Amino acid sequence: MIERVAVDALWVVLSASAPPVVVGGLVGLAAALLQAVTSVQESTLSFAPKSAAIIGTLIGLVAWYGAVFSALAHRCFLHVAELG
């Protein structure tokens, strides 16, 4: 029973962290290609768009995050009640 809760929690963490990581990687790759093509080596050129994209992704997914974490908490409380 505890193993099932742990597996659920790990899947929630993995699925919640994947979208910002993927978006940050893609924007970072695009910024690196732009820097390579234009020969501009400005450090903020990769940091600022990557940060904005990750923040935008987090804001866009806040409702989904709430639903996913709420469902996980509900399942955890049900398992605690079964143990009690």
Image (spheres, helix red, strand yellow):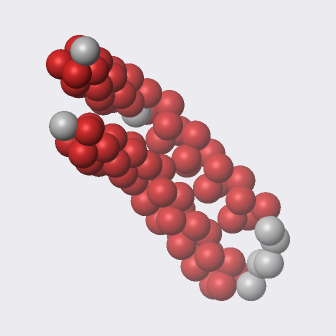
Which residue is rendered at x = 53% and y = 58% of the image? 24
In the current view of this chain or complex, which residue is farthest to the front?
Answer: 84
Residue 23 in the image: x percent, y percent? 46, 56
Q: Which of 13 and 32 lies nearest the eye of the viewer?
A: 13
Q: Which residue is drawn at 64% across and 54% down?
A: 49
- Which image quarter holds the C terminus? top left
Answer yes or no: is residue 78 visible.
Answer: no
Residue displayed at 79% across by 61% down: 44
Q: Where is residue 25 in the image (x, y as percent from the top left)?
A: 50, 65
For residue 82, which quarter of the picture? top left
Q: Is residue 49 left or right of residue 24?
A: right
Res 65 → quadrant? top left
* Residue at 65 percent of width and 85 percent of height: 36
**Left-right relation of 13 to 84:** right
In the image, is residue 23 above or below residue 9? below
Q: Is residue 38 above or below residue 13?
A: below
Question: Quick check: 5 left or right of 54?
Answer: left
Task: Please state which of residues 48 and 21 is positioned toward the viewer in this rendering.
Answer: 21
Q: Which residue is nearer to you in this view: 62 or 35?
A: 62
**Numbered disc total:** 0
Residue 15 on image: x %, y %? 33, 47
Q: Does residue 19 sit above or below 59 in this rendering?
A: below
Instruction: Please state, as top left, top right, bottom left or bottom right, where the N terminus lies in the image.
Output: top left
Q: Nearer the viewer, residue 6 or 33?
A: 6
Can residue 28 be seen here? yes
